[in-house]
Amino acid sequence: MGNWHLAVVVWTVLVAAMTLSQVAWADAIGQIKTLSGDVAIVRNTVKSPAKAGDLLEKADTLVTGTDGRVGITFIDNSRFSLGPNSQIALEKFTFNPTTQEGEFLTKIDRGTLAVISGHIAHSAQDAMKVQTRTTILGVRGTSFLVQVQE
């Protein structure tokens, strides 16, 4: 009888852990893979220090300090790298993993953003865009660098 109860408890804990991890990823559009120096996430006007492994949500803003650098991988396999003194807002992100289609809009206010586009950019013209104060770049499946000076 004791082994059966233990098996039920272990099963319940495993199912709960899997469910909680899926809930945590439910709103996630990407994850911080690497960082160094001062990096922060602004979510709902609350600024928090970032760390490797943090999940990102649409409408998050990332800010790096004078020594900050961050590498991000998104769920469509796009990859971003931000250099020092950068600020980007993840304005819009939708992605259907079955059809590999979606829409991705990033606004860069200042700094340096290196991009390797993922599935969204390959799905349709102008599905992925990077906006600065003066222009909008339509991404069509490529790697590029954007630098915005204050």
Image: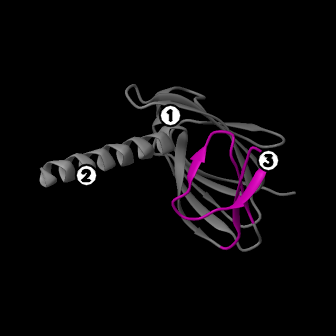
Cα distance, mark 2 to mark 1? Answer: 39 Å
Viewer-nearest of discs 3 and 2: 2
Q: Tell me if 81 is positioned left or right of 48 in this view.
A: left
Q: Which residues are magenta?
A: 37-64
> Looking at the rendering, in which quadrant would you find the C terminus?
bottom right
Cα distance, mark 1 to mark 3? Answer: 27 Å
Q: Earlier in the sequence, mark 3 or mark 2?
A: 2
Read off the residue under disc 1.
120
Judge by depth and name the residue closer to the eye, 81 or 126: 81
Looking at the rendered structure, the secondary structure element under dot 1 is: helix
Cα distance, mark 3 to mark 2? Answer: 40 Å
Read off the residue under disc 2.
10
* Mark 3 touches mark 2? (CB < 8 Å): no
* Mark 2 touches mark 1? (CB < 8 Å): no
Looking at the rendered structure, the secondary structure element under dot 3 is: loop
Q: Which residue is pictured at 64% across the width and 67% down the height?
A: 69
Read off the residue under disc 3.
45
Q: Tell me if 127 is positioned left or right of 41 in this view.
A: left
